[in-house]
């Protein structure tokens, strides 16, 4: 289970680090006398929009287990994708930001789909054996002799 846990945390930290690097590169470009165009901003938008759901996961883990944090971030991502359609602003920058936001959410959902399933299965397996570090409370003890908890 720790492997999947580490994958989630590492991916979140990498996404946030990539965003910081994109911002730093953009700031360097802004500080130079060179011309600025949309191609300079595009990597910042992409990195920022991709990091956003991962940042949400890390924030949520302060108050809940990792599985619940990823579930909540996934639910939010799905809600945003369902409720917000294609942006039709007169501003090309606004349209591009909205597109990058949708793309970042889709990438997040794609990357977490199989991992969250594995985390849940492993958590369920541990819980049936008498509790785990992921759950807020251990599974109740049972002595019936016939359930997964007693047989494990």
Image (tube, rainbow, N blue to C red):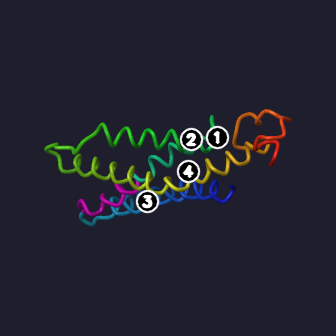
Q: Which mark is residue 11?
A: none
Q: Which residues are magenta?
A: 36-48
| Residue 42 counted in the magenta span | yes
**Crowdedness of circle 2 by 10 Å Cα count: few (<14), some, many (20+)?**
many
Q: Which is more N-terminal, label 4 or label 3?
A: 3
Q: Give the x, y percent position of residue 134.
A: 69, 43
Q: Residue at x 28, y 39 (%)?
A: 84
Q: Are marks 2 and 4 in contact (CB under 8 Å)?
A: no
**Crowdedness of circle 3 by 10 Å Cα count: few (<14), some, many (20+)?**
few
Give the residue at mark 2.
69
Q: Which mark is residue 65?
A: 1
Q: Which mark is residue 24?
A: 3
Q: Give the x, y percent position of residue 144.
A: 83, 35
Q: Give the x, y percent position of residue 52.
A: 44, 47
The residues tagged by marks 3 and 1 sit, at their Cα atoms, a distance apart of 32 Å
Q: Residue at x 57, y 45 (%)?
A: 58
Q: Is residue 22 left or right of residue 148?
A: left
The residues tagged by marks 2 and 3 sit, at their Cα atoms, a distance apart of 29 Å
**Crowdedness of circle 1 by 10 Å Cα count: few (<14), some, many (20+)?**
some
Q: Is residue 91 left or right of residue 82?
A: left
Q: Which is more N-terminal, label 1 or label 4?
A: 1
The residues tagged by marks 4 and 1 sit, at their Cα atoms, a distance apart of 12 Å
Give the residue at mark 4.
116
Residue 82 location, quadrant: top left
The residues tagged by marks 3 and 4 sit, at their Cα atoms, a distance apart of 32 Å
Q: Nearer the viewer, residue 24 or 75?
A: 75
Q: Label 2: state its secondary structure.
A: helix
């Amino acid at each position: 289970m720790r492997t999947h846990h580490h994958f989630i945390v590492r991916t979140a930290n990498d996404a946030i680090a990539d965003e910081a690097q994109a911002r730093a590169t953009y700031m360097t470009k802004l500080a130079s006398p060179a011309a600025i165009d949309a191609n300079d901003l595009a990597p910042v938008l992409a990195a920022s929009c991709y990091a956003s759901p991962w940042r949400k996961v890390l924030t949520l883990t302060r108050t809940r287990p990792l599985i619940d944090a990823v579930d909540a971030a996934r639910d939010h991502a799905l809600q945003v994708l369902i409720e917000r359609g294609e942006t039709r602003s007169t501003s090309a920058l606004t349209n591009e930001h909205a597109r990058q936001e949708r793309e970042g959410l889709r990438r997040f959902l794609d990357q977490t789909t199989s991992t969250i399933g594995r985390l849940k299965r492993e958590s369920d397996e541990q819980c049936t054996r008498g509790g785990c570090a992921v759950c807020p409370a251990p599974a109740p003890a049972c002595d019936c002799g016939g359930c997964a908890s007693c047989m494990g």
